[in-house]
Image (tube, rainbow, N blue to C red):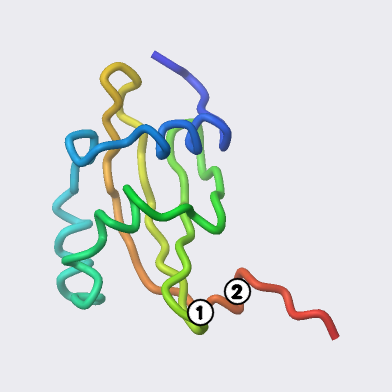
Amino acid sequence: MNTGWDVEDIIRLLYNLSIDNLIETKHFTKHIEENIPEISSVINDYILCKKPVGILKQDNSKFKLYYELDEIYDLIVIIGIKSESPTTISLITCFKQESKRRVRKDD
């Protein structure tokens, strides 16, 4: 088992991911249904088909993924890598965040 993942590892894992590799935690499911229900039916499309616009390492096996929702908001998905072979990724939580927190405007 890998003891320390980096951003390059996550990019590689996301590129080769399938729906069978994802595990939704109870917190994730509850949070998305209560706070961003408009995303609940397409959340897997974001993770499986879209490229994140940002990845932030939070610890050795936990990462914060940024996906662009629209001009105002990003979708933030927190994932945890549970195993490498077979790849198992736990979807910990998700939320909307204003994209201006990610995008820097030059004056």
Q: In which quarter of the image is the C terminus?
A: bottom right
Q: In which quarter of the image is residue 32?
A: bottom left
Q: Residue at x 56, y 55 (%)?
A: 54
Residue 68 marker: none
- For the N terminus, the image quarter is top left
Circle 1 sits in a helix, a strand or a loop, which is it? strand
Tally of numbered discs: 2
The furthest residue to the right? 107
Position of residue 73 in the picture relative to residue 86 (left or right):
right
| Lateral position of residue 41 relative to residue 77, left or right | left
At x 16% / y 59%, what residue is drawn?
29
When asked about the image quadrant of residue 23, the answer is top left
Q: Is residue 75 left or right of residue 101?
A: left
Instruction: Residue at 51% x, 28% y: name it.
Output: 5
Cβ atoms under marks 2 and 1 closer than 8 Å:
yes
Vertical position of residue 62 compared to residue 105: above or below: above
Q: Where is residue 99 in the image (x, y as percent from the top left)?
A: 55, 76
Instruction: Please give the residue where the numbered disc 1 appears in the rendered image.
Output: 98
Query: Badge 2 is on which residue?
Result: 101
Q: In this view, does 24 lie above or below 14?
A: below
Q: Residues within 10 Å of mark 1 (few under 14, many from 20)?
A: some
